Image: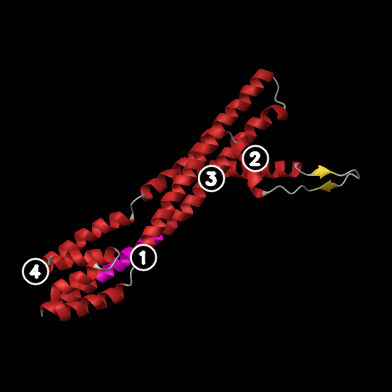
Amino acid sequence: MKKLFVFLAVLGFIAISAQYAVAQTATPTGETEQVEVPVHQQLKTKFIEGGPGFMATILLCLIFGLALAIERIIYLTLAETNTGKLLNKVEDALKEGGINAAMEVCHDSRGPVASIFYQGLSRADEGLEVVEKSITSYGSVQMSQLEKGLSWIQLFIAIAPMLGFMGTVIGMIGAFDAIEAAGDISPNIVAGGIKIALITTVFGLIVAIILQLFYNYLIAKIDSIVVKMEDASISLMDILVKYEK
């Protein structure tokens, strides 16, 4: 299936390139003069040629996917904290004011690390084992919050090329219907259907590629935050061990 998508994408690129070459006009002396067409105008033309139905659906996949990706980027950016600085504040608060002062520091700090610290410190009077379990449990909750919405982005990544491929199949069916009606295999008869088919596939693949790049970036960012959460949680346990002594 992936090889077929790549093959259709190459054919689409060739078809689009060929059509752009036709846009050149001949001068009276027989020389060709290239007509400059704005990029947005070319995209608009191809969008219309691909068929409003499928192309609009693919465009919606891109819009919703980008909206979710941007929301996650903002959320993850705000979730990042200086764990070293936070640990120093918590340790100083423990020495000066005890557990309540440390909890207040965590309450006033943003990010999942501070939330995990707060949950762990709230169970400090029940023993280190309970604190560790609380940190582990709440860490899983925070991780699910970080990954919220990624499944929808994955869905749009999968659906966009499928919709493009469906448009390709329908376009090919239309081309064969035209052949059957005309009783001829003239290129002029089938060119329109094949062009529409290839345009939908190309746009579907482009949308999937764009969203895949954002998805991989988000996964890398989440992994970085999770590693910091785990390191900070271990450091907090070490601080509590010192405090109890």
Res 3 seen here:
no
Q: Nearer the viewer, mark 4 or mark 1?
A: 4
Q: Position of residue 113 (x, y in %)?
A: 27, 66
Q: Is residue 223 magenta?
A: yes
In 3D space, how far apart are the residues under numbered discs 2 and 3 (Cα atoms)?
Answer: 18 Å
Where on the picture, by quarter, is residue 240? bottom left
Asked if the stretch drawn in magenta spans residue 195, the answer is: no
**1 or 2: mark nearer the eye:** 2
Q: Which residue is mark 1?
A: 224
Label 1: how many Cα within 10 Å (few below 14, some 14–19, many 20+): few
- Residue 135: give x, y in percent of width and height: 19, 64
Magenta stretch: give its range.
Answer: 219-232
Q: Amino acid at mark 3?
A: Leu
| Figure quadrant of the C terminus | bottom left
Spatial separation of the CA atoms under disc 4 and disc 2: 68 Å
What residue appears at the point 62 percent right and 42 percent down from the top-left corner? Answer: 44
